[in-house]
Image (cartoon, helix red, strand yellow):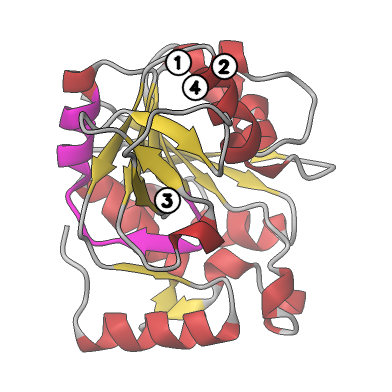
Amino acid sequence: MIRRAMVLAAGLGQRLVPLTDTTPKPLLPVAGRPLLEHILEFLRAGGITEVVVNLHHLGERIATHLGDGERFGLGIRYSWEDPILETGGGIKHAEPLLAGEPFVVMNGDSLLELRLADVIAYHQRRGGLATMVVRSDPDAARYGAIELDAGDRVCRVSGRPAAAPAGLRVFMFPGLQIFDPRIFEWMDPGAAFSVTRVTYPRLLTAGVPVYGFVTPARWVNIDTPDALRAADSVLRDKPFRY
């Protein structure tokens, strides 16, 4: 069983200005409470007991709101960034808090309605270095297309590497993934970089096994004002179940 997770919560939330001038994006309310609380509920339902949250923009607000995590039934620790290190750099920076065992990573601005325990079991069964949760979406290319072969092995991420087998299926990545601790060997320390644009292409070019967990699950995100309103409406109308 996997017991550790990281929530990526350091972003500036620039597309949500002026809301994010005073409130960090993960604390924006969705269906009556911060989206970050929904995320923690999702993780706890999946058997997670320890959570690392990376912080930069208005990070003190997040740390004050969550505290040590006791009221959420979790142990929460923080990985502070200055300057901000993007997704891959942020994960690498948190290595002292995550190393030694597999861990879940999810974005602090999105949420899926699925059983995390099912994803964890799939990751352990397939034995890859990483598992990306993926779903069909007509706008997959806008998010960065994730291309899988017939055996659900990831072959290309956002067009990288250039060489790939024919007949791949195209999905989008909603920001939920699982890593073996060996992932840190593929990440450069002290650098700001994207895990999808840098780390995954590096793995795929080297032939390292990465798998996709294909799901039709409902998904919400809050990266724009319209998306925030839609997420609020969806979760008020029919709350997610985990």
Measure the alpha-carbon separation of dots 2 and 3: 21 Å
Residue type, mark 1 in image: Pro
Residue at (44%, 69%) from the top-left corner? 35
Segment tinted magenta in the rendering: 107-123
For the residue labelled by badge 2, is the local secondary structure a helix, a strand or a loop?
Answer: helix
Using the rendered image of the protein, determine whether residue 99 is visible from the camera's viewpoint.
no
Residue 232 locus on image (x, y percent): 39, 84
Measure the alpha-carbon separation of dots 4 and 3: 16 Å
Measure the alpha-carbon separation of dots 4 and 1: 17 Å
Q: Mark 4 and 3 residues: CB-CB less than 8 Å, in contact?
A: no
Using the rendered image of the protein, determine whether residue 149 is visible from the camera's viewpoint.
yes
- What's the mark number on residue 181? 1
Residue 29 on the magenta span:
no
- Residue underneath mark 2: 184
Position of 221 relative to 4 (above/below): below
Q: Earlier in the sequence, mark 2 or mark 4?
A: 2
Q: Earlier in the sequence, mark 4 or mark 3?
A: 3
- What's the mark number on residue 211? none
Residue 113 on the magenta span:
yes
Camera-side mark, 4 or 1: 4
Camera-side mark, 3 or 1: 3
Residue at (53%, 29%) from the top-left corner? 200
Residue 27 locus on image (x, y percent): 54, 69
Position of 233 relative to 179 (above/below): below
Rendering quarter of residue 161: top right
Residue type, mark 3 in image: Phe
- Residue underneath mark 3: 173
- What's the mark number on residue 204? 4
Q: Earlier in the sequence, mark 2 or mark 3?
A: 3
Graded by Cα atoms within 10 Å as few (under 14), some (14 to 19) or many (20 or more), the crowding at tag 1 reads some
